[in-house]
Amino acid sequence: MESSGIIGKDLRYTSSAYGTPFYASLPLGAQPWVLPLEQSMTRSDIDQQIDKHRHWLETTSLDHAQRVSHLHNLAVAYHFRCERHMNTADIDSTIRLCHEAAFLMGTSHHLRGIKMKILGDAYRMRLNCSGEVADINESIRIYKEALDLDLPSNIIRVDLTHALGLGYQARYQVTATMWDMDTSLQLLKETCDATAGPYQMETARRRDLALGHQIKYLRNKDPLDIDTAITLFQECVDHTPTGDPILATCYANLGTAYKAKHRKAGSFDDLERSIKMLQHAVDISGVLSDIDTAIEIWQQAIDSSDTKKQQATHLQWKSRAALERFNKTKSVTDINQNIPLACRLYELGNRYRVKYKITRDEADLIAGTAHLWTVIQNPSMDVYTRILAGEDAMSFFALADDWKQGYEVADSLMKLIPSLVPRFLEAFDVQYVLRDIEGMACEAASMALNAGKEPLTALQALETGRDVMATSIDDLRGEVDILKRKHPDLANEFLSLRTALDLPATKDNDPDQRYEQGNAFEILVDKIRQQPGFEGFLGPPSEDALKLAASEHPIVVINVSEYSSDAIIVLKDRMLSLAVPDLSYVKIKAQSRHRDTISSPAVLSWLWDVAMKPILDFLRFTKIPVSDEEWPRVCWIPTGPLSGFPLHAAGYHANGSSEAVIERVMSPYSSSVKAIINGRQDTKTTREVTGDISLLVAMETTPGATTLPFATREVNMLHRLHKSMLLDPIICKNKVDILSQLPNCKVFHSLVTVSQTARILPKAIYFSKMMAKLTLWKSESC
């Protein structure tokens, strides 16, 4: 089979070379005692070997010929103990000893590649304890350096390549960079094809490749990935003999893959297959006494863990065993007895929340939130897990109407979010990372207001959430322009790095360079923030800056979340909040799935009644302005699911009605207050010199589509608004007018009803469809 990459097409594992994946890479001196350890895995055996090699190293001269071997054997022993007990000190010892052995060995030793693999494995394992990208980056670097050596065996090359594939997979799970996943799958496929020998090795390689495809499927929904995973998992089942303890895991993996396929796009048959495979796994995994034993073992591991993250890992396994016991006994007593033990951390913390919803027992509230707080506040745990635990905690406190503690959780989470999205991520990777925390800033703002905090606190939470997504040069233009005037060298360096990070990754790029650029960017941002006047660079605006943004007209941020709906009103001298409780989050979410109807008269009148009228009345915009010169302006910033709704069109549009937003104020929009501030960096002088043209098009009636009764009035309002912005607005009457002015215009605003399909088409196709509609409109109206 043709193969491109690190492994050649002619490399194969042979039976005579096989040990276990870890055992096969060890030097001969370590094999006699490592093999029994891997079979029995008792801690006392490992401790004895650690004591033995430590004693030898402590009592032997530094230049002894066997020192490298003993350093390596001691490192392997620590590695095994860490695998068993997840003790961070053990893996740190492994890394230290491997570095010392590598230094003594030199760069030309024939076993250097083997020992570098152990070092790379140690850094990869430490990622599980630290959550630090630096650890997995170092692991990948070491594997690649080892592969560049003149290796004495192709078997070692295959082992290193497999480890490198797992390294990229591990980094993907931390950073969500798709390049890492694609590279991982390529390398794992090559090693899978190059492995021929005992079934245990082949099964392990197939499993790793299958898991990679399944992880990728959960993101891209490509049926080919989940079908490939299922095929590989099925091969694992087929090649594992009855009686092998690993067979239950093979069935469980296969059942989980079918479940994933059914959940996303599969048929009912996939669900039945999933149930069948998972039942096989349960049937051959042991009797109830085995499950009880497993629970006892994991409880011992929990009690002896030296970090909360270790407890979390052990609790996950114990909880699964406990749930299996409940599934067999169906005993409610078992659930109550197991909850205090199995739900201490995030994996099962939300079960207290489920129970609390039923019982309203304060003990459940205290226990559940305490465990979730432990996760949130533990810096050794990965940021993503801490954020998800925080979301559960906020929901918990909301159930209890404890908004003060809910806000404390929200405040902690908002400080964590920026570190969840490192600068080296591409835009589509950022969107994927943030998929599960969409709306968190809105929830934090609601928590703040419900807890009695000032509107400024809620607004800054929203601005922080927006800044996480502000990754392009266009998003940052205003701040960069100011930086250029004060510190041109820093600005040029900033733009250079930001431009490099805005470029999409390709197969020819070195991903490690992108990580280095991301780190350099963070260092540069810190340096900029040390300059006077730039302390808030790329951060949320200060209170004074927010008020200054509203110096010309009010800014209204309408925040919608599961916990409340509120308007945050920014005026030139103060900030206020107004609750709009009838603006239902559930109704908005349900309506937003039907985009064709959000501009229907029923929806527009509902928006007016529950939100827009109360807000305008609060601002005392209660009448139609007397003249164009007196027409007031309100800038709207909708959040969350409300973002796609036409707030400016809310109201009743019967002839002569003044009950509509468009009859009372002009309505520009913005994505955030900071976007308003940045946008004002374009000076009025520049606009006057350039003479920017804006094109305005209105089609109240479109053949085959719903009508837009407010379209003409909206265009007239926009005409006034654009005049005040020193633009030169032109209202186009037909297709000829549009096509003649389009090449010269700065702004193009159209009110044309389009189908849901057209909304998601590429812009060129959408525009051609709109032109076709304009052709029909022209034939009827011109």
Image (cartoon, helix red, strand yellow):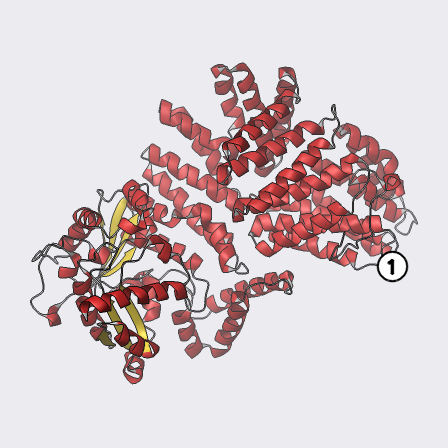
Q: Is residue 334 above or below residue 98?
A: above
> Position of 148 compared to 170: left or right?
right
Residue identified by numbered label 1 = 108
Q: Is residue 308 above or below residue 419?
A: above
Q: List x then y, in percent, for residue 84.
A: 70, 34
Q: What amino acid type should be assigned to the residue bearing mark 1?
A: Ser
Q: List x then y, in percent, for residue 160.
A: 76, 50
Q: List x then y, in percent, for residue 717.
A: 18, 67
Q: Quadrant of residue 364?
A: top left
Q: Residue at x 21, y 65 (%)?
A: 553
- For the residue pair 569 and 425, the one nearer the viewer reads as 425
Q: Residue at x 83, y 30 (%)?
A: 36
> Position of 409 compared to 112: left or right?
left
Q: Residue at x 31, y 42 (%)?
A: 590
Q: Quadrant of residue 289?
A: top right
Q: Quadrant of residue 680?
A: bottom left
Q: List x then y, in percent, for residue 725.
A: 24, 74
- For the residue pair 363 and 515, the one nearer the viewer reads as 515
Q: Is residue 696 above or below residue 164?
A: below
